[in-house]
Image (cartoon, helix red, strand yellow):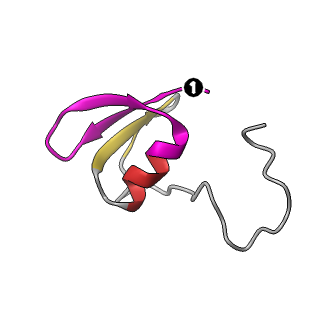
């Protein structure tokens, strides 16, 4: 699984897994994270939730 570069609220950078990234976004622990298209600011840019409670099917994205 590919790791994602994040910048925490205190300015420190780190590499995290996608599941940890979602937790960091949910807890408002990061200022931004990097996608192939550039930096994403969770408070400004649209960010989809990796786990949707509405979907009842099998999760295939990480298979």
Q: State the SS at label 1.
A: loop
Q: Residue furthest bottom?
A: 54
| Total labels drawn | 1
The percent position of residue 9, horizontal first and vertical second, equals 19, 47
Say above or below: 41 vs 62.
Answer: below
Residue 19 in magenta stretch: yes
Judging by the rendered image, the residue that carries numbered circle 1 is: 2
- Quadrant assignment, res 61: top right
Quadrant for the C terminus in the image: top right
Q: Residues within 10 Å of mark 1 (few under 14, many from 20)?
A: few
Say above or below: 7 vs 60.
Answer: above
The percent position of residue 27, horizontal first and vertical second, equals 34, 60
Residue 43 falls left or right of residue 53: left
The percent position of residue 10, horizontal first and vertical second, equals 14, 42
Say above or below: 53 vs 38.
Answer: below
User: Residues in magenta?
Assistant: 1-20
Q: Residue furthest left?
A: 10
Residue 57 in magenta stretch: no
Quadrant for the N terminus in the image: top right
The percent position of residue 39, horizontal first and vertical second, equals 39, 36
Name the residue rendered at 84%, 55% in the picture.
58
Q: Residue furthest right?
A: 57
Residue 4 falls left or right of residue 6: right
- Quadrant assignment, res 52: bottom right
Task: Using the image as rendered, state which of residue 24 and residue 47 is in the foreground.
Answer: 24
Residue 38 falls left or right of residue 14: right
Name the residue rendered at 72%, 39% in the picture.
62
Name the residue rendered at 31%, 58% in the picture.
28
Name the residue rendered at 35%, 49% in the picture.
41
């Amino acid at each position: 699984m590919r790791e994602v570069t994040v910048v925490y609220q205190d300015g420190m950078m780190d590499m995290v897994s996608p599941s940890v990234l979602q937790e960091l976004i949910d807890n408002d622990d990061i200022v931004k994270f990097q996608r192939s298209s550039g930096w994403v600011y969770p408070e400004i840019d649209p960010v989809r939730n990796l786990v949707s409670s509405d979907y009842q099917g099998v999760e295939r994205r990480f298979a």
